[in-house]
C-alpha cells in the first residue's frame, strides 16, 4: 500500500492487487468483502455502494479504457463529532477499480488514525481473504 498526493493536494492510499493474489474476481465480490469488514466493526456504519462505472457510463462521461468496473463502498466511522467542520471529511469511501487483470483500491486519508489503520488493514486483508 502506498500513500500519494492526488492532484497535488489530496492524500490518498492506493493498493494494487493482481487478481491472482486474491480470491475475488469482480468488483461486486470485493464490495461484499468490505461490507463484511464494516459490519464486523461496531464503530462503523455502512451507508451505501455507489456504482461509479454505471453512473459515468449512463451520463456519457469519460472512463479510462483499462477500467472495466468501478464502485465505492461508503461508510462512516464517526466515533466523535468534535466540531461541525469534521462533517466536511465524512463519510469515508473506499474505491474499487477492476483493471482487467488487477484491482486498484483507493481511499482518502482520514483525519483520525484509527480509521486509516482499519481501512489499510481491510485492504491488505484482500490478499489473505477467504473468498
Image (tube, rainbow, N blue to C red):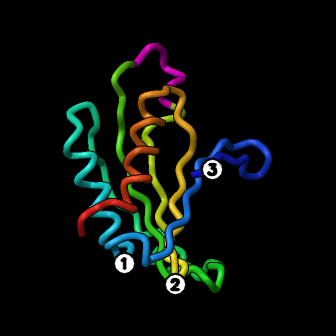
Residue drawn where x is 30% and y is 48% of the image = 47
- State yes or no: discs 1 and 3 in contact (Cβ < 8 Å): no
Residue drawn where x is 37% and y is 49% of the image = 122
Say if 104 sits above or below 5 in the image. Answer: below
| Front position in the image: 129 or 84 | 129
Asked if the stretch drawn in magenta spans residue 17, the answer is: no
Q: CA distance from mark 1 to mark 2?
A: 9 Å
Label 2 environment density (alpha carbons within 10 Å; few <14, some 14–19, many ≥20) = some
Label 3 environment density (alpha carbons within 10 Å; few <14, some 14–19, many ≥20) = few
> Tag 1, which secondary structure?
loop
> Tag 3, which secondary structure?
strand
Image location of residue 68, percent across then percent down: 51, 83
| Front position in the image: 54 or 116 | 116
Label 1 environment density (alpha carbons within 10 Å; few <14, some 14–19, many ≥20) = some
Which comes before the other along the chain, label 1 or label 2? Answer: 1
Q: How many marks?
A: 3
For disc 3, the marked residue is 2
Residue drawn where x is 33% and y is 23% of the image = 79
Image location of residue 93, percent across then percent down: 45, 49
Look at the image and give the residue range highlighted in magenta.
Answer: 81-87
Q: Is residue 67 left or right of residue 37?
A: right
Residue drawn where x is 49% and y is 27% of the image = 113
Say if 2 sits above or below 21 in the image. Answer: above
Q: CA distance from mark 1 to mark 3?
A: 22 Å
For disc 1, the marked residue is 26
Which comes before the other along the chain, label 2 or label 3? Answer: 3
Callout in the foreground (2, 3): 3
- Taking the view exactly as shown, the residue that stands out farthest to the top is 82
Say if 26 sits above or below 39 in the image. Answer: below
> Tag 2, which secondary structure?
loop
Per the rendering, the mark at residue 100 is 2
Amino acid at each position: 500500500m502506498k500513500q500519494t498526493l492526488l492532484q497535488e493536494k489530496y492524500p490518498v492510499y492506493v493498493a494494487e492487487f493482481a487478481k491472482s493474489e486474491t480470491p475475488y474476481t469482480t468488483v461486486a465480490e470485493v464490495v461484499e468483502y468490505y461490507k463484511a469488514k464494516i459490519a464486523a466493526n461496531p464503530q462503523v456504519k455502512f451507508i451505501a455502494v455507489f456504482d461509479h462505472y454505471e453512473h459515468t457510463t449512463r451520463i456519457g462521461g469519460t472512463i479510462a479504457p483499462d477500467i472495466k468496473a468501478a464502485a465505492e463502498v461508503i461508510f462512516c466511522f464517526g466515533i466523535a463529532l468534535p466540531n461541525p467542520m469534521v462533517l466536511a471529511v465524512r463519510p469515508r469511501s473506499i474505491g474499487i477499480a477492476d483493471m482487467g487483470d488487477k484491482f486498484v483500491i483507493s481511499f482518502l486519508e482520514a483525519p483520525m488514525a484509527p480509521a486509516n489503520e482499519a481501512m489499510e488493514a481491510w485492504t491488505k486483508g484482500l490478499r489473505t481473504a477467504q473468498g
